[in-house]
Amino acid sequence: MSKKVVLITGTNSGFGWLTANTVAALGHKVYATMRDIQGKNADQANALAQVENITVLDVSLTDEASVKNAMDTIIAAEGTIDILVNNAGVSMFGVAESATPADVQRMFDVNVIAPWRLMKLALPFMRKQSEGLIINVSSGWGRFAAPFTVVYGASKFALEGLSEGLHYELRPLGVDIAIIQPGAFPTEMSQKIQTGSDTSVAEGYEVIAGVPNKLFAAIGQMFETVKPDPQDIADEVVNLINLPKGQRPLRTVVDPSTGEITKRANEAVKNEYANVLKAFGMQDLLV
């Protein structure tokens, strides 16, 4: 297996941390990004920097200059980039109406615009070498927009939309786009959930005020009975890297709890998506 140059975002914890370590252990050159490596993430950055094959970069994904500087650093050192893993993300919970336009903008800035910013920078190099892989970490909520996760789900729907179209657009050029759809996992992200800023609407939702507790109880029970392991996401990233070019699936579900539901939905959409492309004369892209 040839050694690849890999950029992974959101490596200070959770899926990103595990993925950076797992991919580096295989001998790939990993550039691990996180914010504020001299401040709140100093310990995490220092720990990763001690790992063979990992270079830590201080990157604010919502800052165009910061992201471009990171990509320029990688290209100056390596000459290209082979794999991009858009893992970083933020979540939001609560009644959708409580989200202000600024809240929605913040969610999309991190979950949609930031991955696109990186894809735009990486794609010229991948196209030039007729080979590359972009893995976008989405969510089961990128398939089902659940109550109380509406804004988060909307951002993941958008990321999936970008990924789905690009998958077929870029495959003839030798570049693969793949989505990983995690289910509920006990990571630090689940402990940093944002809420909408407009608290004035809460009174209007008293009739369903108890429903979120049922959701949290169900997730807690999943964690106790199924015991989902975040390492599974890192292992799936490796699996996608190892698959031959052009044979990587668009969507991969990693969810030991409710994943079969998402898989069935994905398969149904995949079949009808093929019919859409055929209807509009693009059936050649399905090969």
Image (cartoon, rainbow, N blue to C red):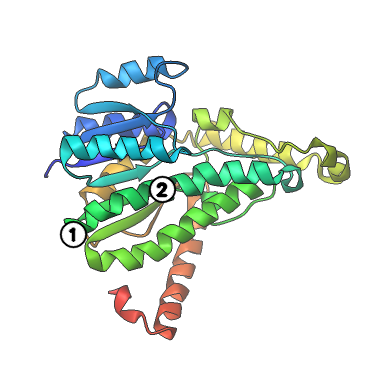
x and y percentages locating residue 182 in the rendered image: 46, 45
Front residue of 208 and 82: 82
For label 2, the SS is helix
- Give the left or right position of residue 35, taking residue 78 as reference: right
Q: Which mark is residue 20?
A: none
- Is tag 2's residue or tag 1's residue first in the polypeptide sequence? 2
* Residue drawn at the location 80% of the way across and 36% of the way down: 199
Front residue of 103 and 283: 103
* Residue drawn at the location 24% of the way across and 21% of the way down: 51
x and y percentages locating residue 280 in the rendered image: 43, 83
x and y percentages locating residue 264 in the rendered image: 48, 62
Q: Quadrant of the C terminus?
A: bottom left
Quickly name the residue at label 2: 117
- Residue 240 visible? The answer is yes
Outermost residue on the front side: it is 65
Q: Nearer the viewer, mark 2 or mark 1?
A: 2
* Residue drawn at the location 25% of the way across and 68% of the way down: 172
Between the C-alphas of marks 2 and 1, the distance is: 20 Å
| Above or below, 62 relative to 136 | above
The quarter holding residue 20 reads top left
Front residue of 189 and 197: 197
Q: How many marks?
A: 2
- Give the left or right position of residue 65, taking residue 84 as reference: right
* Residue drawn at the location 37% of the way across and 62% of the way down: 166
For label 1, the SS is loop
Q: Answer yes or no: do the residues labelled 2 and 1 have beta carbons within 8 Å?
A: no
Q: Amino acid at mark 2?
A: Arg
Quickly name the residue at label 1: 130
- Give the left or right position of residue 45, taking residue 287 as reference: right
Q: Amino acid at mark 1?
A: Ser
x and y percentages locating residue 245 in the rendered image: 21, 58
